[in-house]
Image (spheres, helix red, strand yellow):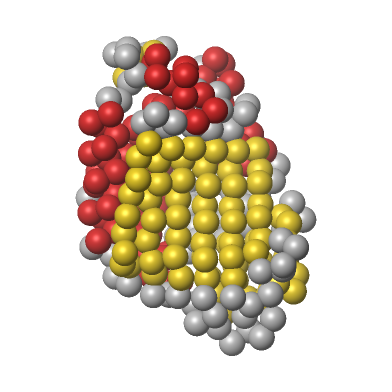
Amino acid sequence: MIKKFFSCFTILCCLFLCTSCFDVLEEINLNSDGSGSMVLTVNMSKSKTKLASIMLLDSVNGYKIPSEDDIDEALKDVVLHLKKANGISNIKQTKDFDNYIFTVSCDFEDIASLNGIAKDLIKEQNAKGKTNFNTTNFSFDVSSKIFQRHFVYDESIKKSFLHLKKEDRKVFNDANFIAIYRFDNTVENISNSNAKISPNKKAVMLRLDAMSLIMGERSIQNKIKLTK
């Protein structure tokens, strides 16, 4: 199953390298008891016309172009992986090949269940690539009402990027990572200066360009203190 997860990641990377405009959206709705729901979205709609033409080809710049069936199978593999994870339920996936928007969503019993989804995948990557990515992506202390998005930058990210061909690097110029976290309680303060608190103070949004993340100039790490 880990190999299938890597296969899905590879397929998405192939599509990324064929378009210069895409957003990766991470959404979490957290209940006061630590349970909640998560939605991951890959949105390439800004380049849908270009992608529609590219999908008719076998390869571009040496990269094999995945078919709609390849993408469909990859998403099914992700769903199968989630169904085997403890504390994960209500798993859904959507695919829109007209606008090239793909989502995977699920409910989780607690943050530990959410971290468990990608734990084995991250460990496999660390062993394979001699990297040191954190296996704990999120944490939530119910008593102190502190939610954290953990992230430790690894220099291998920049090294991998610099090994790409010059024309392939350009595709990340207009790419973005967006994180939206919604809560039952109001937000008192946040640690990431690039993040913004919503007017109703029950959500936090962080939008970063992909290049700043790749080069280690900015981070998705955030500590969010909620009211008790």
| Residue 141 in view (yes/no) | yes
* Total number of numbered discs in the rendering: 0
Quadrant housing the C terminus: bottom right
- Residue in the picture at 46% in, 40% down: 42
- Residue in the picture at 47% in, 24% down: 48
30 relative to 64 in the view: left or right? right
- Residue in the picture at 29% in, 43% down: 75
- Comparing 26 with 128, the one in front is 26
160 relative to 205 in the view: left or right? left
Please determine whether, in this image, residue 54 is positioned above or below residue 108: above
Q: Quadrant of residue 89?
A: bottom left
Please determine whether, in this image, residue 166 is positioned above or below residue 27: above
Please determine whether, in this image, residue 60 is positioned above or below residue 182: above
Q: Position of residue 170 (x, y in %)?
A: 59, 21
- Residue in the picture at 30% in, 25% down: 66
83 relative to 48 in the view: left or right? left
- Comparing 8 with 156, the one in front is 8
Please determine whether, in this image, residue 144 is positioned above or below residue 160: below
| Residue 12 in view (yes/no) | no
Q: Position of residue 40 (x, y in %)?
A: 45, 50
Q: Position of residue 127 (x, y in %)?
A: 37, 49
Q: Quadrant of residue 15?
A: top left
Q: Quadrant of residue 202?
A: bottom right
- Comparing 28 with 62, the one in front is 28
142 relative to 74 in the view: left or right? right
Q: Position of residue 36 (x, y in %)?
A: 46, 70
